[in-house]
Amino acid sequence: MGLSIAKIKLSNPRRADLEAVEIDALADTGAVHLCIPEHISIQLDLEMAEEREVTLADGAKRKVPYVGPIKMEFMNRVGYTGALILGDQALIGVIPMEDMDLIVIPGTQTITVNPDSPNVPTSVAKGLLYG
């Protein structure tokens, strides 16, 4: 599978006086969180909530800042999340993608809204009972 890139808009919901930042972000279905470079965190004046330990692709563990809140916008979707300060490119993990009901289309290397719910994001609020 190739790289899937999405143009997303990030802003600080606590700082309406700051301009939003539009960036290209890599979709990574193997990652959990939104990851952003430090300069974006500085530009949006995001507050550090805590440090989190992350496992990198090579298996190494590292403590990184976790900041937020962040308002994330893509197409007709909006989500609120936190972010790990890590790397030199923004990366969208599965939590923000699931929250905004987005899907990755490997064939076209794109990210889009779920075609089963094009107008309103859907979610599951309860588990299914099997029996």
Image: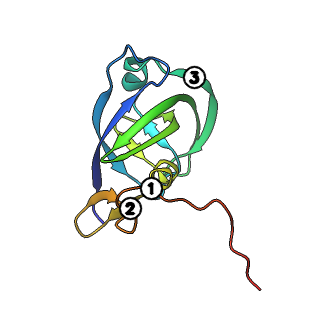
Residue sitting at x 28%, y 33%: 22
Q: Quadrant of residue 2?
A: bottom left
Q: Position of residue 4 (x, y in %)?
A: 29, 56
Q: Amino acid at mark 1?
A: Pro
User: Which circle, 3 or 1, is nearer the viewer?
Assistant: 1
- Vertical side of 120 occupied by 45: above or below: above
| Numbered mark located on residue 48 in the image | 3
User: Which circle, 2 or 1, is nearer the viewer?
Assistant: 1
Q: Position of residue 27 (x, y in %)?
A: 37, 52
In what element is the residue under mark 1? loop
Pick whichever, 97 or 60, lies toward us: 97
Q: Amino acid at mark 3?
A: Met
Residue sitting at x 68%, y 63%: 126
| Numbered mark located on residue 121 in the image | 1
| 125 horizontally vs 104: left or right | right
Q: Earlier in the sequence, mark 3 or mark 1?
A: 3
| 117 horizontally vs 32: left or right | left
User: According to the image, label 2 marks what residue?
Assistant: 103
- Vertical side of 54 occupied by 128: above or below: below
Q: Position of residue 95 (x, y in %)?
A: 52, 50
Q: Quadrant of the N terminus?
A: bottom left
